[in-house]
Image: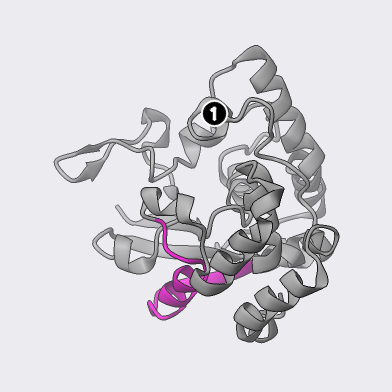
Amino acid sequence: MKLNIITSYPKSGNTWMRYIIYELFFNPKNHENDNSLNIKKFIPDLHKIQLKNNQLILDEDLKNKKIFIKSHFTFDQMKNFPMDKIILIVRNPLDVFVSLYNYYGLDDKNKDRYVDEFAQNHTLPGLNKFDYPSWSEHLIKWLDSKLNICLIKYNSLIDDFDNEISKLSNFLNLSLDQKKLKLLKINTSFSKLKSIEKKEKETKSEGFFKDEPVAKFKDRYFMNIGKKDSYKNFLNDAQTSKLKDSFGEYIKKYNL
């Protein structure tokens, strides 16, 4: 059994992509999905899956179905898994920084220090405990893996959803009609996903929004803003320049 991998550096659109894959592969009758439990079940998180005899323990509902696994690891960390197709999501690192900063509620008084750390190491210290790679290491290791990769840009999903989904569908050998595409846009909109998280937090419903570390921050939402160029209203000119100097080659090469 080969695994299809959905992978990104944290806060780069992985959750959005899991909802998209659910709609494409696990919702053939186009029922409204108003929860995160379906996503947790059908597109499981590698960092939460149990292992038995070096085998992943998956939900029974995935029997005889395509397997998609979400991960923030590099290829090197996963190279012993039997992998088929890789959906690699990349987001402007300055927006990633803002999203991480807001999600973890970091102190604004120390923003310059965190900017320096992200510019120097391409990650934040708190992520080391999860054994996650840096932003650039994650991207480079996967692109150098020589596997079958579809590179999806977060900004392109925002600006040109139809074409980005068309590219993804071709990669996954799917035919997608306009009706399904329209439903896909509605069912995976940021406002829809945020409303699901809000409802599940209020009702303490089962799903990945109840899991750690998402549930740890009761006063903050995992689905926060979901826009591009959010760094422009968050970073001053000096902070922006420092991060652009550090990540500039990637931003230019991948048009982020």
Answer above or below: position of 177 versus 38.
Answer: below
- 67 vs 181, left or right, is left
Q: Residue furthest left?
A: 53
The quadrant holding residue 192 is: top right
Q: Position of residue 245 (x, y in %)?
A: 66, 83
Taking the spot 53% from the left edge, 69% from the top edge, the residue there is: 122
Depth check: give the residue in front, 211 or 193.
211
Taking the spot 55% from the left edge, 70% from the top edge, the residue there is: 150
Taking the spot 64% from the left edge, 67% from the top edge, the residue there is: 93
Magenta segment: 132-152
- 180 vs 170, left or right, is right
- For the question of whether residue 83 can be seen, the reply is yes
Residue carrying label 1 = 216
- For the question of whether residue 175 can be seen, the reply is no
Specify few, some or many for label 1: CA neighbours under 10 Å numbering under 14, 14-19, or 20 or more.
few
Q: Position of residue 21 (x, y in %)?
A: 59, 48
Q: Position of residue 253 (x, y in %)?
A: 64, 86
What residue type is disc 1 on? Lys
Q: Secondary structure at mark 1?
A: helix
Answer above or below: position of 201 versus 158.
Answer: above
Is 149 included in the stretch rendered in magenta? yes
The quadrant holding residue 168 is: bottom right
Taking the spot 61% from the left edge, 80% from the top edge, the residue there is: 246
Is 250 included in the stretch rendered in magenta? no
